[in-house]
Image: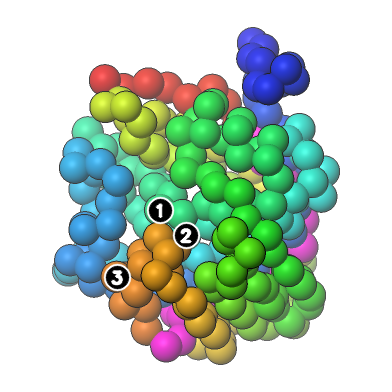
Amino acid sequence: MSVTVEDRTLTFPVRIADATAVAGCWVVRAADVRPVLRDAEFEVAAVAGRTVAVLALLRYRVSDLGAYDELGLAVPVRHLGRLGAHLLQLPVTGPFTTAAGRQLWGLPKWLADADLSLGPRGATSEWRADGHVVLEAALRTSPTVLPVSVPARLTALAARDGDVLRSPVRGRARGLRVGFGAAARLVGHGPHPLTDDLRALRLPRRPLLTVGIEHLSFDMDPAQVVR
């Protein structure tokens, strides 16, 4: 199956061949997540009134969508009983991946400028919109690499024009580094939708854990439209 995005042809599954990432996971109140969900049909996936929020910093080195950097802010939700990851914010540094993400999967990608540095101890970054700094984000993790390769599967859930789009993702992560209670620094310069969402989630000072991935690869299938 092929599709055309901005005069370029893509064939499914869309392939991310090599990326690196550092992510933090925070325990937050489900009541703080509900107001920032993009669709009233989504339910927060929670236990005892608590859920998680994930902020990931990624560099895509080889992919069908080009080379670019990305920040993802996501929460787990349920729709019609199915669990998925709902992206609240997804700034990227490439115009083509912005168009493709919106057109093919309904992802809330928006074009930003970024200075992103990823290393064995974590990541530091600065994100700008319209020439203004909106967020400084830094995550630290363990420098110890785990000698394992981990399969990863999830479904991205997005809302668009009254529909819900389910997008299956199949991947593998190698070169994992996991830190518990590691330091994190998030400094917002708002008002801006990204910093507004982060503020609404009331993230604790320290994440529950951080994860570094030296080599991440995954395939994205076509979105399934649920009306």
The three-letter amino acid code for the residue at tag 2 is: Leu
The numbered mark at residue 189 is none
In the rendered structure, which segment of residues is drawn in magenta?
A: 205-219
Q: Is residue 132 left or right of residue 65?
A: left
Q: How many marks?
A: 3
Quadrant including the N terminus: top right
Judge whether residue 216 is colored magenta. yes
Q: Which mark is residue 88?
A: 1
Q: Amino acid at mark 3?
A: Ala
Where residue 20 appears, as percent x and y from the top left, is 74, 59
Nearest to the observer: residue 19 or residue 174:
19
Q: Nearer the observer, disc 3 or disc 2?
A: 3
Asked if residue 69 is among those painted magenta in the image, a careful observer would answer no
Q: Amino acid at mark 1?
A: Leu
Give the mark nearest the N terminus, 3 or 1. 1
Q: Position of residue 4 (x, y in %)?
A: 66, 16
Q: Earlier in the sequence, mark 1 or mark 2?
A: 2
| Element at label 2 | strand
Q: Which residue is mark 2?
A: 73
Mark 1–mark 2 CB contact (< 8 Å): yes
**Most foreground residue, 226 or 83:** 226
The image position of residue 38, as x and y in percent, is 30, 46
Query: In this rendering, is residue 196 above or below 37?
Result: below
The residue tagged with tag 3: helix, strand or loop?
A: helix
Report the residue that reaches farthest toward the front.
Answer: 131
Element on which disc 1 rests: strand
Q: Mark 3 — residue?
A: 200
Crowding at mark 1 (Cα within 10 Å: few <14, some 14-19, many 20+): many
Q: Residue at x 61, y 39 (%)?
A: 98
